[in-house]
């Protein structure tokens, strides 16, 4: 197993890219910290109960909480697999925890999207609560409005996708997560793609550099 980290602001499209690539290639495994956390919230586990308040406010959940979930997934992932790690690490402390696991990092790809575009993108975002597929009312609409193409479930707007919470998430991104760009650049692991090319081209560009 080795790891490709997706770095990027909320709404940069990293989850869409990872989901697409994993759907095309069984060797690629998409691991989304946000999906792990939302799953724990939905199941009402102790970790989920603790995480919920932070998530609803657009704040980061405690490092130890999310790090344990990621460590568990790493421990159960075996064989010739590339893990597309989406949403973790989100600050330098988490990056150091990941380093200590000894799991090999193949590359870190920054999905670059200007803040101005992010607000619009998130406002139109729709998500399948069942299979986690992501849509956008304009950029990536489902075939039938409000219904998941893949599994037929009704699409939802994520609770933290309202404009005020999005602003807070962007502030957190710039303060906590952006320092990881320099962190991984120093290690020679960082690559960048333009995240404003549309879902298909984004995925192709990502695959080419990862
Ligand atoms: P986005 O990238 O669009 O913000 P995610 O689904 O990755 O959405 O994350 C949603 C929320 O889950 C975050 O705002 C945060 O509260 C929590 N979260 C996800 N990953 C982490 C992490 N690595 N560390 C702390 N909190 C996290
Ligand atoms: Zn679905």
Image (spheres, helix red, strand yellow):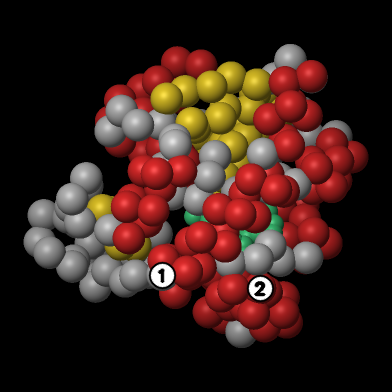
Q: How many marks?
A: 2
- Write the residue at 72% across / 48% down: 176
Q: Which residue is mark 2?
A: 54
Mark nearer the viewer, 1 or 2: 1
The residue nearer to you, when weighing 157 against 38, is 157
Position in image of residue 131 (x %, y %) = 37, 61
Position in image of residue 141 (x %, y %) = 18, 52
Q: Quadrant of residue 195?
A: top left
Position in image of residue 125 (x %, y %) = 32, 58
- Write the residue at 58% across / 66% down: 58
Reading the chain from its start, which is encountered first: label 1 or label 2? 2
Is residue 69 visible from the viewing direction of this image?
Answer: no
Task: State the CA–CA distance, disc 1 to disc 2.
Answer: 15 Å
- Cβ at disc 2 under 8 Å from ligand 1: yes
Position in image of residue 85 (x %, y %) = 60, 41
Name the quarter showing ligand 1: bottom right
Badge 1: residue crowd in 10 Å (few <14, some 14–19, many ≥20): some
Q: Horizontal placement of 205 versus 139: left or right?
A: right
Q: Quadrant of residue 40?
A: bottom right
Look at the numbered discs 1 and 2 and tell me whether their residues touch, using CB distance below 8 Å.
no
Q: Horizontal placement of 153 versus 31: left or right?
A: left
Q: Locate the C terminus and report the quarter of the image it occupies.
A: top right
Badge 2: residue crowd in 10 Å (few <14, some 14–19, many ≥20): few
- Write the residue at 44% across / 37% down: 114
Q: Horizontal placement of 206 versus 170: left or right?
A: left
Q: Quadrant of residue 89?
A: top right
Q: Residue 162's mark?
A: 1
Secondary element type, mark 2: helix
């Amino acid at each position: 197993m080795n790891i490709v980290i997706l770095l990027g602001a909320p709404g940069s499209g990293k989850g869409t890219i990872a989901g697409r690539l994993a759907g095309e290639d069984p060797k690629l495994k998409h691991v989304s910290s946000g999906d792990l956390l939302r799953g724990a919230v939905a199941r009402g586990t102790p970790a989920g109960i603790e995480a919920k308040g932070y998530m609803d406010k657009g704040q980061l959940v405690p490092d130890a909480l999310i790090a344990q979930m990621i460590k568990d997934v790493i421990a159960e992932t075996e064989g010739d697999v590339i893990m597309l790690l989406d949403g973790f690490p989100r600050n330098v402390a988490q990056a150091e925890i990941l380093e200590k696991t000894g799991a090999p990092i193949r590359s870190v790809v920054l999905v670059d999207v200007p803040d101005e575009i992010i607000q619009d993108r998130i406002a139109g975002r729709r998500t399948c609560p069942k299979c986690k597929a992501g849509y956008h009312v304009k950029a990536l609409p489902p075939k039938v409005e409000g219904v998941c193409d893949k599994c037929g479930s009704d699409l939802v707007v994520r609770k933290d996708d309202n404009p005020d919470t999005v602003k807070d998430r962007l502030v957190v991104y710039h303060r906590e997560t952006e320092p990881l760009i320099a962190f991984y650049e120093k290690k020679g692991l960082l690559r960048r793609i333009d995240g404003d090319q549309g879902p298909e081209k984004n995925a192709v560009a990502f695959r080419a550099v990862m």
